[in-house]
């Protein structure tokens, strides 16, 4: 139906705009946050001059991201003397596109009722009728599985880039990326299984909906409350998947120049770097969805708030939609900033330490957490059946 097409076109445009904006802004956040941590000023030279005036808009260096993008697009695209042309050309896109596709199943809000939203325009409200849409591009029941399916594709691009470049440093970076993905993807999967046992579904919308309840009479039923160890393990493994410091061994400038994309320049290199910053936001969005109640505040649902004790605050549909969108963006920004904070706080692992950390430390903890969760869920179900 045309109504469905219009709504999902708006969703796609919003998601693309949000991710590209986050990717650009986070380049500024990384520079400015590093400067604050090192007691420096940071990026503050790029500006936009108002036409026909001498007024320069600096805005704390926010235009540096735009300047970097323009520089990447205008630089000459050097290629190695010997390389596999097809794999070399396609690799940046194999890294970049899946990062965007992952967000397609992430709910960035609650339920949208266009007729209520456009009640002031009766013709528009009548055109939409009683239709209701979850604020999610692709409403797939297996959303959590789709995240892991698309998330695992990016390493293929990294390995293609390293192999096709005919460069030993690039090849070493590609091999590191592959082994790192295998190690930490397993950790991520095991941490999420605990949530699947608790919520009984892999549908992300349903997971968020169940987090709008309360536990122990007053705590929000967020994933981080029910699975605190899994939340910590997940964010660590996700950062390792994104190959950020202290897990940036596939790039490791001091060892491999730039790792798997050493032989890339201009906008091809820009795609690798831009994908990394967008993935920071995507990781934050997934963490928000699984562990922080999604777009909802504590005790919040699509109709307003229900507080412990039964007190309710009803809100209009438009207010709820805007509040959910804003809440989701703030949570994503906070978790993204935390990832950048870690990047400028911890030193890089050695490669043997990186793998040992995954297999001998995180993996046993994940198994223990999963076993304890399974036993707890079983006991609760037995007690509930007995009652």
Image: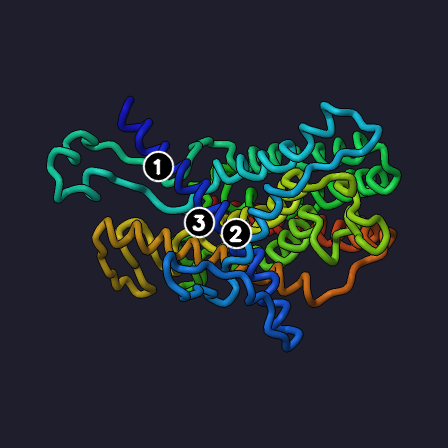
**Dot label at residue 174:** none
Residue 30 place in picture, x, y as percent: 60, 61
Residue 243 place in picture, x, y as percent: 71, 49
Q: Residues within 10 Å of mark 3 (few under 14, many from 20)?
A: few
Q: Residue at x 16, y 34 (%)?
A: 124
Residue linked to disc 2: 66
Q: Does dot 1 land on a helix, a strand or a loop?
A: helix
Which of the two labelled residues, at mark 3 and mark 1, occupies the earlier sequence position? 1
Residue linked to disc 3: 387
Please state if 25 lies on the left or on the right of 205 as rendered: right
Q: Residue at x 63, y 51 (%)?
A: 234
Residue 359 place in picture, x, y as percent: 80, 49
Task: Residue 55: name its quadrant.
Answer: bottom left
Q: Does dot 2 land on a helix, a strand or a loop?
A: helix
Residue linked to disc 1: 10
Q: Residues within 10 Å of mark 1 (few under 14, many from 20)?
A: few
In front: label 3 or label 1: 1
Task: Establish if 219 lies above or below 212.
Answer: below
Visible residue check, residue 357: yes
Q: Residue at x 55, y 67 (%)?
A: 44
Task: Residue 82: name its quadrant.
Answer: top right
Question: Mark 3 to mark 1: distance in Å?
Answer: 48 Å
């Amino acid at each position: 139906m045309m109504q469905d097409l219009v709504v999902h076109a708006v969703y796609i445009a919003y998601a693309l705009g949000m991710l590209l904006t986050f990717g650009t802004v986070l380049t500024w956040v990384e520079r400015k946050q590093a400067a604050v941590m090192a007691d420096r000023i940071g990026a503050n030279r790029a500006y936009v001059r108002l036409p026909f005036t001498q007024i320069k808009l600096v805005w704390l260096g926010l235009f540096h991201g735009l300047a970097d993008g323009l520089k990447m697009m205008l630089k000459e695209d050097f290629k190695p003397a010997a390389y596999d042309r097809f794999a070399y050309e396609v690799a940046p896109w194999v890294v970049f596109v899946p990062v965007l596709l992952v967000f397609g199943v992430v709910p960035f809000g609650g339920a949208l009722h266009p007729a209520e939203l456009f009640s002031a325009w009766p013709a528009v409200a009548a055109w939409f009728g009683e239709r209701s849409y979850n604020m999610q591009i692709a409403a797939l029941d297996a959303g959590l599985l789709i995240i892991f399916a698309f998330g695992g594709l990016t390493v293929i691009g990294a390995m293609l880039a390293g192999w096709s470049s005919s460069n030993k440093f690039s090849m070493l970076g590609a091999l590191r990326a592959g082994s790192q993905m295998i190690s930490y993807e397993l950790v991520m999967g095991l941490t999420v299984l605990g949530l699947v046992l608790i919520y009984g579904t892999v549908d992300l919308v349903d997971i968020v909906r169940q987090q709008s309840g309360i536990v122990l009479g007053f705590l929000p039923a967020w994933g981080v409350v029910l699975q605190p160890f899994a939340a910590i393990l997940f964010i660590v493994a996700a950062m390792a998947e994104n190959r950020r410091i202290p897990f940036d061994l596939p790039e490791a400038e001091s060892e491999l120049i730039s790792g798997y994309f050493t032989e890339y320049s201009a906008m091809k290199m820009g795609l690798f770097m831009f994908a990394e910053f967008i993935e920071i936001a995507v990781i934050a969005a997934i963490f928000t969805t699984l562990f922080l109640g999604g777009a909802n505040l504590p005790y919040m649902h699509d109709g307003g708030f229900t507080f412990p004790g039964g007190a309710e605050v009803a809100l209009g549909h438009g207010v709820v939609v805007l509040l959910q969108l804003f809440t989701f963006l703030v949570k994503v920004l906070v978790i993204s900033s935390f990832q950048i904070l870690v990047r400028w706080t911890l030193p890089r692992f050695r490669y043997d330490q990186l793998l040992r950390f995954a297999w001998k430390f995180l993996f046993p903890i994940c198994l223990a957490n999963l076993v304890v969760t399974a036993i707890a869920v079983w006991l609760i179900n037995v007690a509930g059946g007995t009652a």
